[in-house]
Image (cartoon, coloured by chain):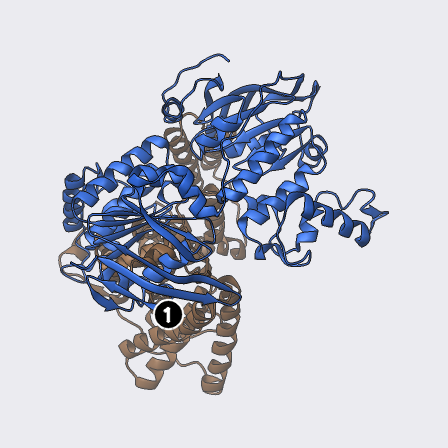
Chain colours: A blue, B brown
């Protein structure tokens, strides 16, 4: 029997790059097929081809043994190929049934017949154990449930092959467990699933087979039962990767940052942060774990001086600095903001300009308001080397760099001054394994030199391997503040999910 | 009852009709994510188009059709520039208002300049059997022109179309998250075009009710800010058909009241009582709506207003205001209503946001 999906010899060239080079792989019905690769390895191009958003230059696509040319997302769905996007395509102000009805052909146009759709949603939800109420507003659902609504949308439209594009990036570990269950029950019902993720553990735990891409080419398709993490990583990166970090024990020095009783209220009495207290000492990394949107962003913004706390005190090396401004914060520390594009770099400016963004007003970069290009040049050249930033030249616009290199520019700008205090919010978000390794190394070097670090991350592995102490932030409160010894990822996940247990450090 | 009699209420319903037509029309655009600031211009085009159409054909209903067509013509320019060419919606809308003013003034002078004032046949009122005999309500609601009844039918149809048809569902999705609509197979640009066309037609009809239904006349710039009042009514009505009906009646009522008050020699005592009751009602509403956060200043100010109203009612001073001041009443009501709604979250999420499908790789 022919496989459900067969892609053969797919090649796609863009000006200057070959995104996919002679890519072939096949997906069987009832199979969970992993697609693994670093950022820029060609995963997303391949998926866009499959979804009719990009036309391949060469190659054949066969569905159920018949050759097809997929013209648009709509056509893809008609052929039974459905896609769950990384950013959900759901209207938050509408109900589940309305969202599902949006893409369906009504059985009696022009009426939308929402009752019918709701009944169908309820039935499918029952069959796959989704626990979705068709009349609930999508905006009120948790991210994990919204993801199920996305899957329901596709099932209602008769999708046989589901493509899940980085579905775990937004989930808690518990939600990931539930998604695993969902995927498995779909596969058991005969659906084929293409599961895209650059996280090795996830691929190993759910995929039946896994196709690894590197630089646009297929490195091989392996049965996941017969492989392990190290060999998958080697296939993906092309060399051995060390992510297990060595964190030599060291006695923390004197406190650098002391936060006491911090509260932050938004308008209407809505509490964003409540009673946050912690200290960071020299040579210590304090990790803040938690699901996105539980106050991490607000905490970082208060500490870097963008917002002012409602009550509470912040002390830096013994001096009270509660009313910080970004300018004053720059004198005492460095920051890697969570939203790189909005708060860390100017995409339209050149690499050079981004590198000196925080220093150009100072001696020796400028003198009496006149900048000194030669100093800029030497300074930037040394940073490129030290931080291994790959760019064609200093004058290219920042937007032309890959995500990893953009982040290295931020890292270089913030860390070249050897700051005593570093706030790193989601420093590896969207980066591939090689770049992550680099960021980890720099963070640990900073620790070695006696710097204090606040690491905010939703990646539990990251927190567990880097932090000396871990605080768990849920709905703007610390539910726990723990020494990073003998904590396992399950326990942390439960705390993040709201199981509150105040443990003194 | 002083100025609050049946005549004022009848006038309120009459004056509400064009506002309601325009606001309901605007609702289509805004729910599809197009902030159509050119509404004022579309009303004016409709007013002139209808007048010209009726004069040319000699038929009032054909005049209405011509009015709608004139609104659609301007709406097509709006859609072409703001949706197809992706120009800034607000800039285009403001430009179209100016264009409509110039175009109608010029055309009116060209066609009718040397003919003197031609008064066309107006639309007569039609009393609905039985219902119109209900005391007070019958006179106010069911002794109106067919244009008013048509407006109510359009409001009811709007609700049905937006909430019970696939077209309406898609329209709302386009205004909230165009990318989601796009992936669901809805042509975002086409749906927005359709929505703006509907807006143009209804705004054109609104203009027709101003010129041929009510007066049988066209006057330069006769829309006189009603498009902006309708825009405010959409916000005030929280982008929902029923809310907009309420908002339009408040604004139309204010308009009817000011017309009536212009004719009074001095401010009638009932007006002071009305202000007092308004203050009391406002205070009660504030307290029930947000018990916990009701600010002392807000409630205090409202109660103060009530006290002033009651005091003036008792004193019954013989003050008179120039009529120009009364003319501003609907706009003052709009300002007060909108300032009370600052920061409201009910707006369609993608309003005034261009949609461009991402094809980056």
Q: Quadrant of residue A167?
A: top left
- Does residue A424 lie above or below A386 as drawn? above
**Residue at 54% in and 38% down:** A437
Placement of the N terminus of chain A among the 4 image quadrants: bottom left
* Chain containing the residue with disc 1: A
In the picture, measured across the screen, residue A139 lies left or right of residue A104, that is right
Rendered location of residue A228, percent (x, y): 37, 38
In the picture, measured across the screen, residue B336 lies left or right of residue A414, that is left
- Does residue B150 lie above or below B108 as drawn? above
Instruction: Count residues near mark 1 (Cα–Cα under 10 Å), then give few for <14, some for 14-19, many for 20+.
Output: some
Outermost residue, top side = A504
Residue A287 in sight: yes
Nearest the camera: A215 or A497?
A215
Rendered location of residue B194, percent (x, y): 33, 67
**Residue at 62% in and 56% down:** A348
- Does residue A100 lie above or below A146 as drawn? below
Q: Which residue is mark 1?
A: A58
Residue B295 in sight: no
Rendered location of residue B24, percent (x, y): 34, 59
In the picture, measured across the screen, residue A370 lies left or right of residue A152, that is right
Nearest the camera: B12 or A391?
A391
């Amino acid at each position: 029997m022919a496989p459900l999906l067969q892609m053969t010899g797919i090649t796609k060239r863009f000006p200057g790059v070959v995104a996919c080079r002679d890519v072939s792989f096949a997906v069987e019905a009832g199979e969970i097929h992993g697609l693994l690769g670093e950022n820029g390895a060609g995963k997303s191009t391949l998926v866009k081809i499959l979804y009719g958003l990009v036309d391949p230059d060469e190659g054949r696509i066969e569905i159920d043994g018949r050759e097809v040319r997929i013209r648009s997302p709509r056509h893809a769905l008609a052929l039974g190929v459905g896609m769950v996007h990384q950013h959900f395509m759901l209207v938050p102000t509408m109900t589940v049934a309305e969202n599902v009805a949006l893409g369906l052909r009504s059985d009696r146009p022009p009426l939308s017949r929402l009752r019918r759709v709701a009944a169908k949603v309820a039935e499918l939800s029952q069959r796959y154990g989704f626990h979705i109420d068709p009349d609930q507003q999508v905006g009120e659902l948790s991210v994990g449930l919204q993801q199920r609504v996305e899957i329901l949308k596709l099932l209602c439209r008769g999708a046989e092959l589901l493509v899940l594009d980085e579905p775990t990036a937004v989930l808690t570990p518990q939600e990931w467990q539930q998604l695993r269950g969902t995927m498995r029950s779909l596969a058991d019902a005969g659906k084929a699933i293409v599961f895209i993720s650059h996280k090795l553990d996830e691929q190993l735990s759910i995929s039946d087979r896994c196709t690894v891409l590197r630089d646009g080419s297929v490195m091989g398709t392996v049965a996941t039962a017969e492989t392990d993490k190290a060999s998958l990583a080697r296939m993906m990166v092309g060399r051995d990767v060390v992510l297990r970090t060595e964190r030599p024990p060291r006695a923390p020095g004197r406190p650098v940052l002391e936060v006491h009783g911090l509260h932050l209220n938004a308008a209407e009495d809505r509490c964003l942060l409540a009673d946050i207290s912690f200290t960071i000492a020299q040579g210590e990394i304090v990790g803040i774990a938690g699901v996105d949107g539980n106050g991490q962003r607000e905490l970082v913004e208060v500490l870097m001086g963008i917002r002012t706390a409602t009550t509470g005190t912040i002390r830096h090396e013994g001096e009270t600095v509660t009313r910080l401004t970004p300018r004053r914060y720059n004198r005492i520390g460095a920051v890697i903001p969570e939203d790189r594009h909005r708060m860390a770099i100017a995409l339209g400016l050149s690499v050079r300009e981004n590198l000196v963004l925080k220093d150009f007003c100072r001696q020796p970069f400028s003198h009496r308001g006149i900048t000194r290009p030669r100093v800029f040049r030497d300074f930037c050249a040394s940073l490129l080397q030290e931080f291994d930033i790959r760019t064609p030249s200093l004058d290219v616009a920042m937007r032309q760099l890959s995500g990893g290199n953009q982040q290295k520019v931020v890292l270089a700008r913030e860390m070249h001054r050897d700051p005593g205090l570093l706030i790193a919010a989601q420093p590896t978000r969207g980066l591939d394994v090689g770049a992550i390794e680099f960021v980890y190394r720099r963070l640990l070097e900073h620790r070695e030199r006696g710097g204090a670090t606040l690491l905010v991350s939703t990646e539990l592995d990251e927190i567990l391997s880097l932090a000396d102490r871990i605080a768990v932030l849920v709905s703007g409160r610390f539910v726990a503040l723990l020494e990073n010894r003998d904590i396992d990822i399950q326990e942390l996940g439960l705390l993040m999910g709201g199981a509150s247990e105040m443990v003194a450090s | 009852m002083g100025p609050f009699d049946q005549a004022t209420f009848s006038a309120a319903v009459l004056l509400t009709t064009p506002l309601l037509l325009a606001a309901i029309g605007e609702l289509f655009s805004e729910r599809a994510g197009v902030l159509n600031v050119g509404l004022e211009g579309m009303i004016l085009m409709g007013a002139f188009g209808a007048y010209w159409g009726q004069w040319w054909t000699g038929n009032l209903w054909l005049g209405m059709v011509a009015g709608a067509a004139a609104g659609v013509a301007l709406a097509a320019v709006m859609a072409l520039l703001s949706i197809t060419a992706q120009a800034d919606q607000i800039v285009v809308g403001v430009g179209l208002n100016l264009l409509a003013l110039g175009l109608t003034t010029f055309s009116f002078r060209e066609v009718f300049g040397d003919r003197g004032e031609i008064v066309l046949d107006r639309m007569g009122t039609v009393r609905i059997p039985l219902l119109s005999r209900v005391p007070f309500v019958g006179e106010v609601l069911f002794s109106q022109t067919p244009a008013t009844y048509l407006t109510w039918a359009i409001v009811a149809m709007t609700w049905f179309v937006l909430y019970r048809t696939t077209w309406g569902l898609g329209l709302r999705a386009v205004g909230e998250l165009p990318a989601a609509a796009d992936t669901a197979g809805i042509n975002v640009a086409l749906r927005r075009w359709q929505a703006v066309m509907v807006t143009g037609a209804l705004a054109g009809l609104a203009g027709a009710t101003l010129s041929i239904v009510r007066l049988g006349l066209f006057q330069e710039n006769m829309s006189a800010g009603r498009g902006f009042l309708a825009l405010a009514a959409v916000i005030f009505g929280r982008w929902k058909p029923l809310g907009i009906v309420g908002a339009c009646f408040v604004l139309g009522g204010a308009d009817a009241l000011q017309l009536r008050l212009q004719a009074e020699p001095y401010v009638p005592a009932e007006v002071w009582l009305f202000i007092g009751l308004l203050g009391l009602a406002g205070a009660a509403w504030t307290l029930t709506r947000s018990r916990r956060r009701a600010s002392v200043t807000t409630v205090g100010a409202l109660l103060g207003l009530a006290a002033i109203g009651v005091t003036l009612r008792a004193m019954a001073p013989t003050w008179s205001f120039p009529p120009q001041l009364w003319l501003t009443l609907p706009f003052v009501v709009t300002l007060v209503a909108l300032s009370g709604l600052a920061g409201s979250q009910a707006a369609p999420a993608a309003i005034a946001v261009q949609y461009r499908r991402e094809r980056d790789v």
